[in-house]
Amino acid sequence: MEFNSVNLKQKEGIDGLILDCRDISQRKKDAEELLRAQKAKEQFLANISHEIRTPINGIAGMASLLSQNPSREEQRTYLNAIKSAADNLKVIINDILDLASIESGKLQLEKIGFNLNDLLHSLIDTFGVQASEKGIKLSHSLAKDANKIFIGDPVRLNQILINLISNAIKFTHAGRIKVDVKADMIKGNNYNLRFDISDTGIGIPKDKLQTIFESFSQADASVTRKYGGTGLGLTIVKQLVELQGGSINVVSKENEGSTFTFSLPYIMGKKNLCRMQG
């Protein structure tokens, strides 16, 4: 509480005081939230500086070694290292550009026909080798009602799933990762598609579940040091989901795993569109 008083004897010659009392809980809460956000942003800038420097230093180092007449075998090794570092740098820059585009309101969503079965198979093939190398079983299931042509933005849906699956692989060291897709008809050709991405990874502390979707946020600094990353992936996911009229949430327990669930509304394509796509 904040108290102020005015002595009326001094001002008006009246024996008395005016006492003003106000609740400043929200003001203090806002100030604390602002300070927390500022610290998170500062931590993000420190993280992103490190994340950008690491691949750049790698590229520069390998390029220097290539200029010293290495053997053919060494050339191949150096070039592979340069490619890997360049790919990492591209992911970081794309995250930053995507977030800037979303927050400025300049992101355009497409409305085209796509098939979820094709999209999921492509994703599982893409991440299959990476999961296999870690000894993780990666699988998916697609409900019959979801195996249809829907109208929407498959590129942004793909981006959401890539972020969530790659996160699951990053934070899972044993067990499995599963992608489940179900469809609920709302009315007529309007459907709500539900995606569940579950893993048996390290999980998320209970007190961090409310902040993991915020910009520049990871569960804690040790996560950044151990696993790397910009801390923007889940922020981008949440904003892409909400831009398309959907919602996302997470259920997690430390050392047991996490399940990210998001829902998106789509319109089912017409029969002639199905034939055209098929």
Image (cartoon, rainbow, N blue to C red):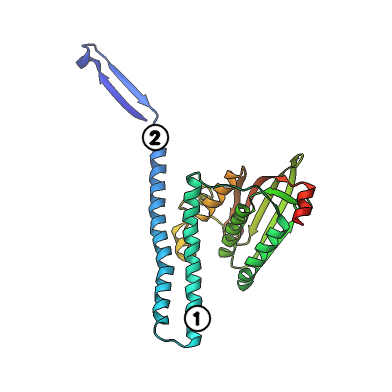
Q: Is residue 70 above or below residue 229?
A: below
Residue beneath the point at 63% across and 62% down: 200
Q: Is residue 8 left or right of residue 187?
A: left
Percent across and percent down for residue 158 are: 62, 56
- The C terminus appears in which quarter of the rendering? bottom right
Residue at the image position 60 percent from the left and 59 percent from the top: 162
* Numbered circle sitting on residue 27: 2
Residue positioned 38% across, 50% down in the render: 39
Residue 26 shows in the view: yes
Q: Position of residue 115 (x, y in %)?
A: 72, 55
Relative side of 20 to 86, left or right: left
Q: Is residue 244 above or below residue 61?
A: above
Camera-near label (1 vs 2) is: 1
Amino acid, disc 1 = Thr
| Element type at mark 2 | helix
Callout 1 crowding tier (Cα within 10 Å): few <14, some 14–19, many ≥20: few
User: Looking at this view, is 273 or 149 the one in front?
Assistant: 273
